[in-house]
Image (cartoon, rainbow, N blue to C red):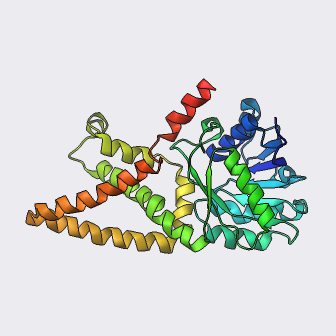
Amino acid sequence: MSEPIYNRVALIGLGLIASSMGHAMRRWGLAGEITGHARSAETRQAALEIGFCDRVFETAAEAVAGADLVVLAVPVGAMGRIAEEIGPHLAPGATVTDVGSVKQAVIEAVAPHLPDHVIFIPGHPLAGTEHSGPHSGFATLFRNRFCLLVPGAAPAAAVARLRRFWEGMGAVVEEMEAEHHDLVLAVTSHTPHLIAYTMVGVADHLRRVTESEVIKYSAAGFRDFTRIAASDPTMWRDVFLSNREATLDILGRFTEELFVLQRAIRMGDGETLFNYFTRTRAIRRGIIEAGQDTAAPDFGRVKAQED
């Protein structure tokens, strides 16, 4: 087995992403030691029992001691508080990264609390499931998924090291500026999640359709909405509040497009509907061609059982 990329990795937050990172680090020998922290004693105990952490601590400050990579895997709204806690305890030369779905707000919350002797490289793996908690992780979650890094002024060697780390877990790594990242994710992730939550909410308020009928007669489209809407509410609350401007911009554009379709349906304009659906179908084909249509949860668990 080759030398680990980092001698000690501290996972702050032990949910789906962090537990999957732990499993992946274990499987491919990417870390010499994995420490962890979660506020819940139950979560800390689960991480030890599952085995993706070597040691867990009641405080984040204890967990980061001596770590050369610290991963902030807590909701975006908690990033600043955690950074303030761990700042004085970070080892000189350590790299701090995160896995948050928003980047500009995380930079503004975290960077002021980090000492000059550490390197901050924000990150975001575009991977996940509707499940949460330490039991939901699996080693292949990041395989063939993009991981976006926002290196800023970080030293090239530190960025290259973090890139190798994510590539070791199977991710495809690209670099992006924070503001652009937040706009792109508002289109590809944040607004679709908000629409999914809304559509499930609409179904819940339709008193003509009983709850049992919604469940019994769910077609594929609604099932997809309910899967997305089952995502962690704390995380998504923080995402929308932190990426407010980009999300509102995309929601405005979505509303304009919706009005076009609404008018075409009302006017019986089949040509507009056909042309619109033909154009948008090409986007789905592009996703397939890019290899991003694989259902990560099933793929990951099947591979985990095979390996």
Q: Is residue 135 left or right of residue 265?
A: right
User: Of residues 37 and 140, which is closer to you in this image?
Assistant: 140
Most extreme residue toward the top, as rendered?
306
User: Of residues 42 and 124, which is closer to you in this image?
Assistant: 124
How many marks are shown on the rendered structure? 0
Residue 26 location in percent, x, y?
75, 36
Q: Is residue 288 left or right of residue 19?
A: left
Q: Residue at x 73, y 50 (%)?
A: 165
Residue 191 location in percent, x, y?
43, 62
Q: Residue at x 66, y 60 (%)?
A: 123
Tell me: residue 27, above or below residue 170.
Answer: above
Tell me: residue 40, above or below residue 271.
Answer: above
**Which quadrant holds residue 21?**
top right
User: Of residues 192 and 145, which is closer to you in this image?
Assistant: 145
Asked whether the viewer can see residue 230, the reply is: yes
Tell me: residue 155, above or below residue 217.
Answer: below
Most extreme residue toward the left, as rendered?
268
Q: Is residue 294 left or right of residue 24?
A: left
Asked whether the viewer can see residue 43, the reply is: no
Q: Residue at x 47, y 48 (%)?
A: 292
Q: Residue at x 73, y 59 (%)?
A: 97
Q: Is residue 133 left or right of residue 160?
A: left
- Quadrant location of the C terminus? top right
Residue 220 location in percent, x, y?
31, 41
- Quadrant location of the N terminus? top right
User: Of residues 106 and 172, which is closer to you in this image?
Assistant: 172
Residue 37 location in percent, x, y?
77, 47
**Which quadrant holds residue 226?**
top left
